[in-house]
Every structure is written in C-alpha cells, then in structure tokens.
Amino acid sequence: MAHRVSVSGRPRICIFVEAPSCRGNAWSQEDDDAAVRILKQLYKLHAAGAGGKSAVEFYHFSKAAGTSVCRASAVVGCTTYSVKDQFTCLIPEFGDGPRWMDREEHERQCERALPDMEDCPKKINFKMAKWGAVYSAKDVRNRCSKRAQLLNESDWTFYASEYTLRGRGGRVDAPPAVCREFLNLAVLRSPRERLLSHMRYLVTLMSGWLGPAAAGSYFAPMVTAAQWRALLPAALDNLYARALLGERVFYAPQGGLTPEEHLTPARAVLAAAMDVVLVLEDPEPLSVLGHRWGLGWQHTLLDEEGRSSEDVGGRVRAVMEQALGVLAGSELDALVAANALDQRLYDWARLLTRLDGMWS
C-alpha cells in the first residue's frame, strides 16, 4: 500500500503533559530538546507499527478537500472502489455517504418557493438528502474486522467515510471509535471557507437538478442563516464535532453542541485517534511534510485541483452569487458564529500539524 509511516497523536499529548510550562514554569532549551527527543522516539515506534495497517480510512469532512485527497491517493498507488466524483473514494455498501439535505425541509422549500413546480420535491439526488439515515444495528459491515476483510478481498487500500465515527465493535449503541486496523486520516479546512464552499456547491447541484432559473427562485427566499441551516442541518452546524463524535452527537439538535460538553472529546479524537491530521490552509512545506512523513506520499492534495466553483457556467454562477449574496454581513457572521466549536477544533488541528513539524 501507499503509506509507510504514521504520525501518532500520542507523542503530541506527551508534550502537553510533561511540559514544565504546563505546570507554570518557563519553557527552557533543555525542555525543548527533551520534547524533540520524545517526539522522535515515539514517532519511530508508531512508524514501525504503521506498516501493518491494512488500509487508509479517510475521514472526509464534506467540502474540505475530499476530492483532492481521493485523487492524490490514486496517484501514489492506493486502490479504492472509485475516484470518480459521484463516489470520491466512498464504498457504497459501507453506508458512509454524506447526510446533507433534510428532505422534508427541501419539500417545504419547494412549496414555498416553487409552488407551481410539482416535481420539485423529486428533482434532487436522494443520495444527497439522507439526513436521518443511521447505521443498521444488524449490518456486520460496521465492524472493523469485516471492513478489513472486504477491503482485502477487493484489493482496496484506501477508502473514505463522509458521515461520522461508528460505534466501537460495530455496535450502534457503543461509544464511537476508529478502526485500529486502518491508518486514520483527517483533513480540516477553515470553517468559514468550508461553509461557503458547501453552500456554493449546493447551489451548483440544485441548478443542475432544477435548472438555473428555478434554482434562482428556490434560493431567493433563503435570506437568513437559519434557513440555510434548516436545509443542511449538520453541514452548517459544527460538522467537525458531529463527524468526530458518533451518531448520537451527529443528530443532536442545532445549537445543541457546546464547548463544555463536546470540545474536549472531539479534540481527543483528533489528537489521539487520528494517525494523520492535515490542514488545507497550512503552508506548502508543512503540508508536504504531513503527506511525506505522515502518509509516505510524494504527491499531495495540493497537487490535485478537486472540485471548484470556478468551473461552473455563467448562468449558474449568477444564481450562486445571488443566493449567497443575501447572506453577506450579519447573517454570514451569524452562520460563522454558530460554528464556533468547529473553529476551535480547526485551531486545535493547526496546532497539531505544527507540533508534527517539530521533528522534521
């Protein structure tokens, strides 16, 4: 398979636990040298174990470079079900696809905005409107061992999950956990940019499903952040936290996630459960370091173009600018503020990638 080494979260934690500055003392050069030695020693231990991983599981936060990562994995020699846009390294039978649109809210929006378009409720890709769908308690493919078996039988070494962590042991009622059989990879993007990208992409999709003119009418009444969040309940409400903390948290009511309850466990997943964490906005040298030392990849997501709103036609672009233009100012600020928990997780991920750079 393509990866050779892994950046473990555990060395990062040791820095915080052992650092004298955490106990109120000044950080010295001696502390710095000791920290680097610890990082290098633990890195070697975890790198030695990474060769036994059977595949890479990529935790794809929607609109955070998933297409680019998927394509880059193929360039370096990883194999998967499909790198085409409609799959983006997802394996259909695993049921890890995105839960984007609330179908009932979409139907209500059709009634409000396009009352004369009878087939409006049906003019969507229902794979994008799976809000409410959960893992089946009877599906053995929730188990890590079964997934590893199926991947091995198909000779696949990379796959994506665009939903949330599964329950430990494949049990839907168990606490969420990653599969230790796999090397676990997560890529985060600036929450503000991810939110805007997701809304732009939805406008593009709806323009294809309904036609640009009807899409313009569909989005015209959506002038508040609350309306957009109703249509995309998780995607526009702290998606990082929801995706890291399992189904119960994923389907928590909007506004129901708090730093007091959810920040620490979500940070722990990034730091201790994810083997490799990358940040889309990191400087290129740091990103290259994460790919080469963390994944063993000489080709990076930065080398792949991925989907881009720049590729849409003029009519769709006009609809997009009109639809998102109404969210400028206070409503956009309100949307970003509602995702403050994700911003703190993003800041945490940026810290982790910089700690990974200490031993470069």
Image: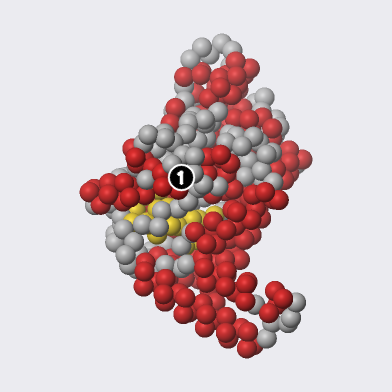
Instruction: Look at 70% across and 74% down and name the residue there.
Output: 22
Q: Residue at x 34, y 41 (%)?
A: 141
Q: Nearer the viewer, residue 148 or 169?
A: 169
Q: Considering only vertical position in the picture, is 246 above or below 74?
A: above
Q: Is residue 221 visible?
A: yes
Residue at (54%, 58%) from the top-left corner?
270
Q: Quadrant of residue 345?
A: bottom right
Given residues 184 and 351, the one toward you in this image is 184
Total residue callouts: 1
Q: Amino acid at mark 1?
A: Arg
Q: Tell which of 10 and 190 is nearer to you.
A: 10
Q: Decide: few, some or many residues near mark 1? Use Cα within 10 Å; few <14, some 14-19, many ≥20.
A: many
Would you name the residue on which mark 1 appears? 166
Residue 292 at least partly seen:
no
Quarter location, residue 97: top left
Which percent across, then down, holds residue 55? 33, 56
Q: Is residue 171 above or below residue 357?
A: above
- For the N terminus, the quadrant is bottom left
Per the image, label 1 sits on a secondary structure element best described as loop
| Residue 226 placement (x, y as % from top left) | 69, 32
Specify whether 250 is left or right of 295: right
Task: Name the residue at 51% across, 19% down.
Answer: 121
